Image: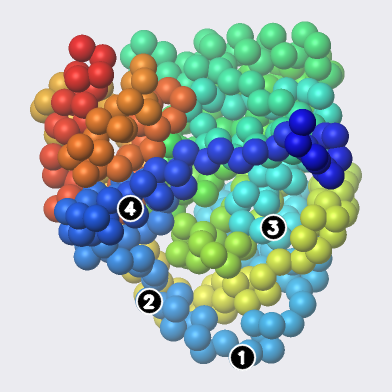
Amino acid sequence: MSMSMAASHAANKRLKDAIFGASAACREAAEKYGADKVTNATIGVMMDEEGKLACLPTMERVYRSMDMTELTAYAPISGLPDYLDAVIDLTFADQKPEGYFGAVATAGGTGAIHHAIANYAEKGDAVLTSDWFWGTYNVICQEVGCRLENYRLFDEKQEFNFSDFAAKVEELLKTQESLLVIINTPAHNPTGFSLTEADWDQVLALYRSYAAKGKRMSLLVDIAYIDYAGEKHETRRFMQKFSHLPENILVMFAFSMSKGYTMYGQRTGALIAVSSSKEVISEFQEINKYTSRATWSNINRGAMGLLVKLQRDASALAQFERERTDFYRLIQSRGDLFMQEAKACGLNALPYKGGFFLSVPAADPAAVCDKLHEDLVFAVPLKLGVRVAACSVSTAKMKGIAEKMKKALDAIEG
């Protein structure tokens, strides 16, 4: 037996990340065959049409203009006050519900998810999300002493499976007094799916019914990809539905600067909450500030300062939003191309509404991805299928991927 110095609860932790594993295999193929011959559909960052990491030019210009002390000084534990006000406004745009609001700065959207799970799920309880999900949800749950359970995201019509969602909520609340649900919408990772307003009506009606029975119902809406989901006011219309909810329903949002500001490595985000109860929001502020101090103390001051500077400069902000809209349209056109070609060749791709990713169901995703390697196409094998990153595949390389995936699926599944 090998020696271990780790605490008993930590000794068996091993991180298996399919995304970075697939990306490593792609790098090896690029070195062997040349990058121009290889299609990297693995990683969730915006790549331009030449295959280079892209960033928003106005973001870069403003960031480089900032004073060094603003980049290097400590920030308050909860975040710069002006930043917190700004992210609340950015989260809701003109669709702000009525209620009390709170926000705490986090280390990216991942940090926001961490805080929500750590503070709103009882240890040993289940957190609920869909069966197509970002794997880090599960890692965080395990790290903080919870478990992740799933409902089937799609019904037989490939629409939101409210029936299975409701059944799973009912099952969990037979043994739990509270429940945290994570819904990644709009532009869901890994499918590109978005809930409709009618879907939200059903979800909130269900939440109200359990709140009336005394259950504490928390909801985390992961909006990491909202800036690549469509027109900003339309994509946020569902948020008005969170007005005047019972005080034992808390709605939170995981905000990220990674995608919307192309600042992936700066690790800056926020957890935002809305409630009909002022006391619930006061508690939210205090407990999440405490968790921040215990986890990372404070986060990247420079990125927070950049967001504030952009929001205060009308001309720069207008240019920034035009540039981001161009990025959104480019990614959307790549995703739409894949879906058109999927339909033409009979490939069963899940409904893509927008965002960085799209997915195809598969019985043996790893085998399908291995088969795609023969065509020098590298995608990510998930539990239920194969994920393709529209954000990182040029339009020229996106052409033909659907047909190659259909060929690989047929070869594996017959």
User: Could you tell me residue 135's position as x and y percent?
Assistant: 55, 36
Q: Secondary structure at mark 4?
A: helix
What amino acid is at disc 3?
Answer: Thr
Give how far apart the Cα atoms at labels 1 and 3 are: 22 Å
> Image check: 200 left or right of 414?
right
Residue 106's tag is: 3
Label disc, if present, on residue 67 of the rendered structure: 1
The residue under label 4 is 28
Q: Nearer the viewer, residue 379 or 156?
A: 379
Q: Residues within 10 Å of mark 2 (few under 14, many from 20)?
A: some
Label of residue 57 in the image: 2
Q: Name the residue type under label 2.
A: Pro
| Left or right, 203 with reference to 212 | left
Q: Give the residue displayed 61% in from the left and 40% down from the top.
A: 15
Whether residue 398 is visible, yes or no, is yes
Categorize mark 4 by other alpha carbons within 10 Å: few (<14), some (14-19), many (20+): few
Quadrant where the image shows the N terminus: top right
Compare marks 3 and 4 and give the one earlier in the sequence: 4
Task: Name the residue nearer the viewer: 155 or 373.
Answer: 373
In 3D space, how far apart are the residues under numbered discs 2 and 1 (Cα atoms)? Answer: 18 Å
Q: CA distance from mark 1 to mark 4?
A: 40 Å
What's the amino acid at mark 1? Asp
Q: Is residue 235 above or below residue 120?
A: below
The picture quadrant where one finds residue 377 is top left
**First-in-chain label (1 vs 3):** 1
Dot 1 alpha-carbon crowd within 10 angstroms: few under 14, some 14 to 19, many 20 or more:
few
How much space separates mark 2 and mark 3, taking CA atoms? Answer: 24 Å
Q: Residue 95: where, in percent of width, then height?
A: 54, 48
